């Protein structure tokens, strides 16, 4: 609607009056006062979603496991879920978004922050917390290093550093030399990480995935034992340690409730329950979540991608169990 009065108000003549009128949302145009009034209804955070995406984004309290293939809008649905939770009154800072790559985490966080709107015009309550499993674990452990028996200046080593450390110790454990050619450092690192992530012994991992290394099972066990001792004595933490420590803290009777109390909702993109440690972390973040509506808004929303769905089918696990994350 546009109104154009014939003259300025008597009590606000001239330029000063025009300035004050403009501050109230009006514009001076051609010597007259023009007032623009825009009336519109804000778009819903669920607009643009199909029925299944909308049902997931607006799921009531309690756990939800979504199986979705490539190109089905998994991340978009989780972003809408985060925005919907903010509209229900959950402060943004009490929503945790977890994913598996840094690039995906950055993209999801930026989209969720842009979409999130607080309820009833209230403050958004900070920013949504999010990142990769390893990044969130690192943040927590760095803040409480002494509680994890680590020096405040502990060093995080990446997978290439881990391979280098294992490589320097292979010979002393009979895995390298002119007379014998054992598994290379990269293979040793893969076996170690799989042992951690699947909670299996070296013998089980070698037998199931690296049968050509069977004769080196004993040496590998000794190599890994020495590697762990070296890390502890030098204040080193690898990516696997980050997850192990976070899980241990969540399971601790004293620390667990404090860490869980930081968040009311946990959203996981590309959830991969083939990784036992990460699956435990997700469960421990919101324990007893089968309580459904009785748990209020607390709950975990996990989305499995095509790869994880295929892995579940290969293990005969099929679809999700109602009321709890499997």
Image (tube, helix red, strand yellow):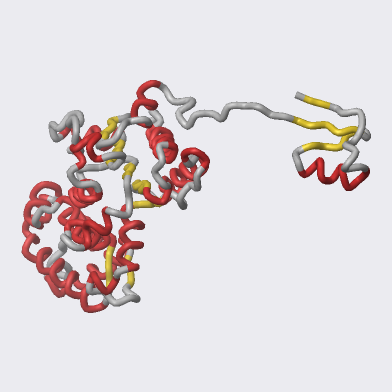
Give the camera-side residue of 225 and 223.
225
Residue at 79%, 37% in the rendered image: 26
Q: Quadrant of residue 290?
A: top left
Q: Is residue 261 above or below residue 146?
A: above
- Counting the numbered discs, the total is 0
Residue furthest top in the image: 51
Would residue 142 be found to the left or right of residue 318 on screen?
right
Q: Is residue 53 left or right of residue 111?
A: left
Residue at 21%, 50% in the rendered image: 284
Q: Position of residue 29 (x, y in %)?
A: 88, 34
- Residue at x 15% of width, y 32% of height: 317
Image quarter (top left, top right, bottom left or bottom right) of the C terminus: top left
Q: Residue furthest front?
A: 11
Q: Is residue 234 visible?
A: yes
Residue 37 x %, y %: 72, 29
Report the front residue among 88 and 194: 88
Return the x and y of residue 269 as percentages of the image width and height: 34, 41
Looking at the image, which residue is at 87% across and 44% down? 17
Locate residue 15: give its quadrant.
top right
**Closer to the camera in the image, 100 or 119:** 119
Residue 67: image quadrant is top left
């Amino acid at each position: 609607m546009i109104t154009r009065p014939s003259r300025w108000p008597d009590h606000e003549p001239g330029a000063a009056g025009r300035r004050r009128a403009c501050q109230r949302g009006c514009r001076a145009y051609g010597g007259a006062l023009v007032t623009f009034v825009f009336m519109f209804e804000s778009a819903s955070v669920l607009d643009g979603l199909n029925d299944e995406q909308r049902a997931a984004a607006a799921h009531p309290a309690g756990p939800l496991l979504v199986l979705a293939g490539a190109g089905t809008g998994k991340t978009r649905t989780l972003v809408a879920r985060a925005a919907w939770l903010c509209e229900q009154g959950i402060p943004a800072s009490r929503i945790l978004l977890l994913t598996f790559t840094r690039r995906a985490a950055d993209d999801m966080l930026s989209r969720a922050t842009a979409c999130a709107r607080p309820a009833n015009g209230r403050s958004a309550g900070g920013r949504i917390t999010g990142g990769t499993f390893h990044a969130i674990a690192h943040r927590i452990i760095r803040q409480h290093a002494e509680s994890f028996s680590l020096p405040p200046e502990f060093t995080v080593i990446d997978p290439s550093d881990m391979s280098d450390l294992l490589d320097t110790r292979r010979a002393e454990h009979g895995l390298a030399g002119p007379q014998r050619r054992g598994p290379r450092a990269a293979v040793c690192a893969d076996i170690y990480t799989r042992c951690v992530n699947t909670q299996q012994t070296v013998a089980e991992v070698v037998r199931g995935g690296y049968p050509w290394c069977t004769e080196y099972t004993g040496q590998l066990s000794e190599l890994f034992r020495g590697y762990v001792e070296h890390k502890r004595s030098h204040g080193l933490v690898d990516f696997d340690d980050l997850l192990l420590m976070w899980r241990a803290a969540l399971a601790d009777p004293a620390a667990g409730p404090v860490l869980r109390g930081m968040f009311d909702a946990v959203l996981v993109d590309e959830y991969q329950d083939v990784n036992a440690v990460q699956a435990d972390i997700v469960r421990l973040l919101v324990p007893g979540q089968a309580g459904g509506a009785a748990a209020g808004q607390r709950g975990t929303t996990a989305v499995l991608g095509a790869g994880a769905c295929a892995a579940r089918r290969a293990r005969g696990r099929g679809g999700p169990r109602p009321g709890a994350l499997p």
